[in-house]
Amino acid sequence: MVTTIQISNPLLEQLKQMKLHAKESYEEIIWDMIEDRMELSKETKQAIANYEKDIKEGNWDNFVSFENVKKELRIDV
């Protein structure tokens, strides 16, 4: 279902300034803002904590080097 919402001119101008490209819709901008405010899932928080622990302990086994990523993607940078 599509609906219309009413916003003030200052908000409209702010949304226009937030566009990353000319064809980006206001809906895309609003969804991006909602996503930015959403709470991370428990699984994501745990994964971040695990990676932070690995980094502190110097355990790099769960990480991929930039060189390996370039090889895997066949990118010559």
Image: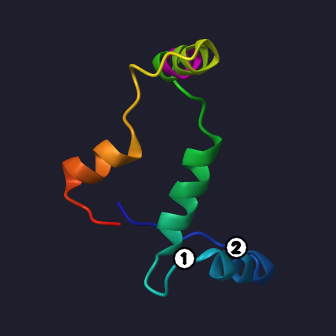
Give me the residue at 80% from left, 80% from top: 10
Q: Report crowding for label 1: few under 14, some 14 to 19, many 20 or more residues within 10 A (C-alpha).
A: few
Q: Amino acid at mark 1?
A: Leu
Report the magenta stretch's main SS: helix
Q: Quadrant of residue 20?
A: bottom right
In the image, 36 versus 63, the foreground residue is 63
- Calculate the distance from the C-alpha at mark 1 to the C-alpha at mark 2: 20 Å
Question: Measured from the top left, where is residue 36 in percent x and y?
Answer: 61, 47
Q: The N terminus is located in which quarter?
A: bottom left
In the image, 73 versus 49, the foreground residue is 73
- Residue 16's place in the image compared with 49, above or below, is below
Which residue ends up furthest to the bottom in the rendered image?
22
Is 14 situated left or right of 4 in this image? right
Give me the residue at 20% from left, 47% from top: 72
Give me the residue at 49% from left, 23% from top: 44
Q: Amino acid at mark 2?
A: Ile
In the image, 68 versus 2, the foreground residue is 68
Q: Bounds of the magenta span?
A: 45-49
Question: Measured from the top left, where is residue 13 in percent x and y?
Answer: 72, 83
Secondary element at image label 1? loop
Which residue has dot 1 on it? 20
Which numbered circle lies on residue 7?
A: 2
Is 39 situated left or right of 12 in this image? left
